[in-house]
Image: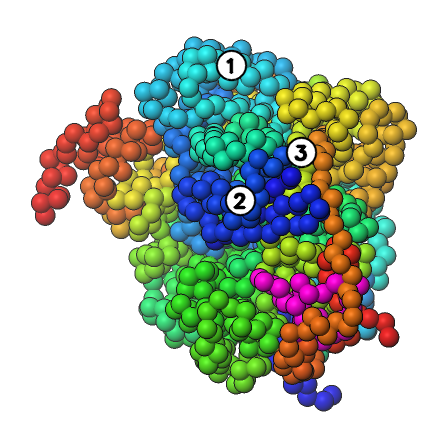
Amino acid sequence: MRVATDIGGTFTDLVAVDDQGKTILTKSHTTPPNFEEGVIRVIEKSGVRPEEIEDFIHGTTTIINALTERKGAKTGLITTKGFRDVLEIARCNRPDLFNMVFAKPRPFIPRYLRREVSERVSYDGKVVTPLAEEDIRAAVEYFKKEQVEAIAVCYINSYANDEHEKRTVELVRRLWPEVFVTSSIEVTKEWREYERTSTVALNSYVMPVASSYIDNLDRRLKEAGCDAKEYIMQSNGGTTTFEQAKQTPINMVESGPVAGVYGSAILGKMIGENNIIAFDVGGTTAKCSLIDNGEVKVTTEYRIERTESYAGYPIMAPVVDIVEIGNGGGSIAWIDEAGSLKVGPQSAGAVPGPVAYGIGGTEPTTTDACLVTGRLSAENFDNQVDMDAVRGAIQEKVGDAFGMDTDEAAMSILRVAEANMYNALKLISVRRGYDPRDFTMVAFGGGGPMHCARLAKELNIRKVIVPIAAPVFSAWGMLMTDVRHDYIQTNIRRMNEVTAEELNGMWTGLLSQAREQFEKENIPEENIVCNYIADMRYMGQEHTVKVNVPPIPWSEETKEEIIRRFHDTHEHFYTFRLPDTPTEIVNLHLVAYGRLTKPELAHIPPQEGPVETARKETRRVYFEEEGWIDTPVYLREKLGSGASLDGPVIVEEAAASTVAAKGQRVTVDVYGNLIIETEVQE
Amino acid sequence: MAEVKVSPVTLDIVKDSLIAVSNEVFYAFARTSMSPIIYETLDYASGIADVNGKLLTQGNGACGFIGLIAPMIQEIIEKYGKENLHPGDVYLINDPYMGGGTHLSDIGMVMPVFYREELIAFIGNKAHWSDVGGMAAGSFTTDSSDAFQEGLRFSGVKLLDRGEICQPLLETIKSNVRFPETSEGDMWGQIASLRTGYRRIGELCDKYTVEVVKESMKRLLDQGEKIARNRIKELPKGTWEMEEYMDDDGYGNLVKVKVKITITDDEFIADFTGSSPQVASPINTGYSSLCAGVKVIYMSILGPELAVNDGVFEPMRIFAEDGSVLKCHAPAPTSCYFESMIYSSDVVWRALAPVFPEMLGAGHMLSVCSVVLAGTKQGSGEPFLIVEPTGGGWGASDGKDGEVGQFCVGDGETYNVPVEMAENRYGIMVDEYSLHTDGTGAGKYRGGSGAVRSYRAMTDGQLFTASFGRNKFPAWGAAGGKDGSYNYFEFHDADGKVEGPMGITARRVMNKGDVVRMVTCTGGGYGNPLEREPESVAWDVKNEYISLEQAREDYGVIVDPETFEVTGFTEKRRQEAGL
């Protein structure tokens, strides 16, 4: 059996598929600081027998927590002579333009733990100054004295020649076998020294934490009788083995959220949709990501803790390209100084939570507005909801400010929240040259199903899928993932100068790295699938666009084809092309998958008899265009495949509520996914 | 037309959408640009204005571009008349003496936005081109004596006529700039981003109706003004004066910058009367840039988080004498206009620092420390051109040490060029990029360290031009904190000759193996150094921000050189503590 567990802030989710193809969903409380405890508990609670588990896939927030809570190891950094302050100078930028007392990010490694080594490689990979091994010995001695637990190594131009970094790590390991050590090129071979240094510094910083976490989890699983192959979810949308995760834990930084995006891509493939907009609304944020022709997009421009006014810390490892905004169920509605209604980014969180939770929340939230407008039912809350308190908060904090009644005020909160989500969805689609009409939306998380039909209609998206397991869809996505490794190599070459043969040679180098890695992970050769991406630009430009390129071997004709694709891609993203300007390749990016066996999903029973048997109630729901309408509410688990419901309609399940308006239709497919047609042609 | 009653919530949603459009236009251009000065330094701004040229929203990379888009638009309206503008038109403007002017290198473009034949808005942008012609590669230099030596000047001319490029103008530009492909690439990128904004505003009108969009523009400006007036009411009232001197007028003389700030119940007035007349070196600035320099500090005390629009600027009044260094006439040279612009920021900052200690700290590195290096790349022999700012130390403030290695106030969301990129693209090797830990700027809160960046020429005949202001006057300390240090650069030639330190040079030849070492200052300290936490002093020694001697002399703390523990205090510190 294949089992996925995903640790979140509040709950640890489990999704599995049994031998009959039936999906098992279980939730259990997260158990900080011993997170592995919650994993064992959720397995017990699910009824899955540990010895039955063949593949165990795990998503965890351990790494991001260690970073944001600054609970990593005391770490030392070894750099090229003259460059130890690169980590502190960073990029000199000040996003908070008009704040004269801004604070820039403090480096994770203080100055006294950054040591320099005499060595130098030129931009084209030639050794200018040989590596002074005695400097490394001195640094190690110093670090021992300072009792560091981990060491990071990053040299200038190591992307062009990694010998010195490799030799340094070798030497450190020999001199001090117990210390954790990584070099930048083990994580990425992309250029830009600050970003690469930051990446490896953070990697080493979390290595000891990651190592002990993974070892504990492994031990607990074995003790419970589980002898599965163990994988961990990475930020690139694929998994890796426990062993590799201990060496490059920074690749797990966005372990959880990306799985939902990957799951959307897989779900799309299952039902024949390759262009997907994944839309995930949780308690504090909404996230969205675009999948173009089945491919999840990754970026290496990720930063932790970045905001509009704070630069954050770069991690130059591939992360699924997600746009995240501070708008979720717990987001607070408030009036700004100018008198405008705002929703988020501040969230009421789990405590005190929305007013509806009755545990001290006094600020109206999106969840409260959903209750007042009838999108959510008070009966589905664990507590007894005090509707007077909910209505009172909305009236007092929002209604009175605009001279609106409570219903109108609640609707206004939803309009502003959805406008924020709409702008985020446009950002990933229209603004990047995609026409939403060519896409299907997959909506999940606790709040996704509630907002999706309306937003999709506004964006002219015709079809929305609310998948099975929508509230725990990230875990479902993990269940469906493959092992994935990204190999990125900066090598700036002009397309009219570099030969196809040279390019083939570079790709072959990356391919052999991938094969070597998969061999270590016991992935058979025939299960390896590779995608080839070239980061390209016009000569003179700095920023690149990712171009999907054919597999090798390339000929001179393939090169022509690639240049054509680049012009098209550039025009797609930026509306213009420069046909006479020479083009350059900056990075080769090999995406290597090790395909794993996926569970077969069973069909749910067909709808028999009238859908009315699944009807729970009729309640009044406030819609923006029509006002209050009597709206039938159905229970999702009682609907069979083929069931068809005309809007206005609500379909409820344990932790989510799907809302469709008049003129929209909800049907149930063979797997139990809800399919919403956003504009039914009469 | 019937009165449309629109929910304020709808207006707010449209308002936020307009801001989103402005952001999109901003980033689209940065990502397609051919010039490092644009794509890394983001020496670039774009904005949307209403039908009368009032700024609605602006995307800034460089702080110093604040509020410069709308005056360009107003110049075009005035010159041509609204009735003579057409869909698809784009106007070119870089005149330093006109509205929105900076220096010739910053090319402005203005596009009127129509919706179904009706002029409803304007969109504009302004970007630093790598070269616009003139006497020196990179077009800005430190020794030009009039505007004609600084490149092409466009005083609001049509570049696109109803969507068609004016071919003669394009050819003229390409024949007069040093990197025609780069400039043409940037030009089309600039145009493409304007067109994107145009399309997006149209889509907003499709979705919400043009009436609602126009109404929300009005709401945006009204709200901006309302907030600004509310906040000004709460500020301390009074008049404060300050004068400072810039290093050099080109002939070794100091240049005075003087201000009188008055805050009343509803106005913020900056009067620069008494500042030096315009000078023969290119550090003069036009009136628009002076206003930008003041607006930066105005925003910082009013609320750095506020959205930038012309409503917010309504309460401002700025005066300077015609023909002064801060409001110069044609054809005064302006290619290093930012020196005086940032001095105008600094003098306002320094005047108000005691009044707003929570928003304004001690003095910072101040100068852009601009570098222009032209030469050829080793191996290929291809020409290269570096145009970049240099980061330095910022002052400490109440409760916080100064920041290290940051660009000056006039920059902002501006990025340094990575060493690895620089070495790949230019004919240089970077010997060092580190902090300049001279330990100055002592205070209860310590000034941030400057930076050292050293370039080694890899080919013969490279030409180095730089303007490192704050070479004669250090970053000032505040509230009892000590001054920081000075910006300078020096040459270490391959033959062993050393030249410098100095703050200004034009086209100094560097041959293979010659090194220029660029050093920026440490920011000013804040508060009495004898009151700094002893553990912080020890930490500073351990991290080599200050020396053992400085710990003892400036801070009165004796630190063990092996363990970095505090072992005692000087008599001076003990006395101070006893008081």
Q: Which numbered disc flags the more N-terminal residue, 3 or 2?
A: 2
Q: How many marks?
A: 3
Mark 3 / mark 1, whichever is N-terminal: 1
Q: Secondary structure at mark 3?
A: strand
Dot 3 alpha-carbon crowd within 10 angstroms: few under 14, some 14 to 19, many 20 or more: many
Q: Quadrant of the C terminus of chain A?
A: bottom right
Tell me the kind of residue under disc 1.
Glu
Which quadrant would residue B456 be assigned to in this image?
A: top right
The residue at the point 29 percent across, 30 percent down is B541
Which residue is labeled 1 in the image?
A170
Q: Chain of mark 3?
A: A
Secondary structure under badge 2?
helix
Colour convention: rainbow
Measuring 48% from the left and 45% from the top, which residue is drawn there? A41
Instruction: Using the rendered image of the protein, determine whether residue A480 is visible from the camera's viewpoint.
Output: yes
Determine crowd level at label 1: few under 14, some 14-19, many 20+ residues with C-alpha closer than 10 A: some
Provide the chain ID for the residue under circle 1: A
What is the three-letter code of the residue carrying label 2?
A: Ile
On the image, the x and y values in percent for residue A516 come to 67, 20
Q: Is residue B287 left or right of residue A351?
A: right
> Which percent across, then down, holds residue B522?
38, 38
Residue A377 shown in magenta: no
Question: Helix, strand, or loop for circle 1?
Answer: helix
Above or below, B348 against B9 in this view is: above
Residue B465 position, x and y percent, is 57, 33
Instruction: State the extent of the magenta-drawn residues as a range.
Output: A633-660
| Residue wearing tag 3 | A484
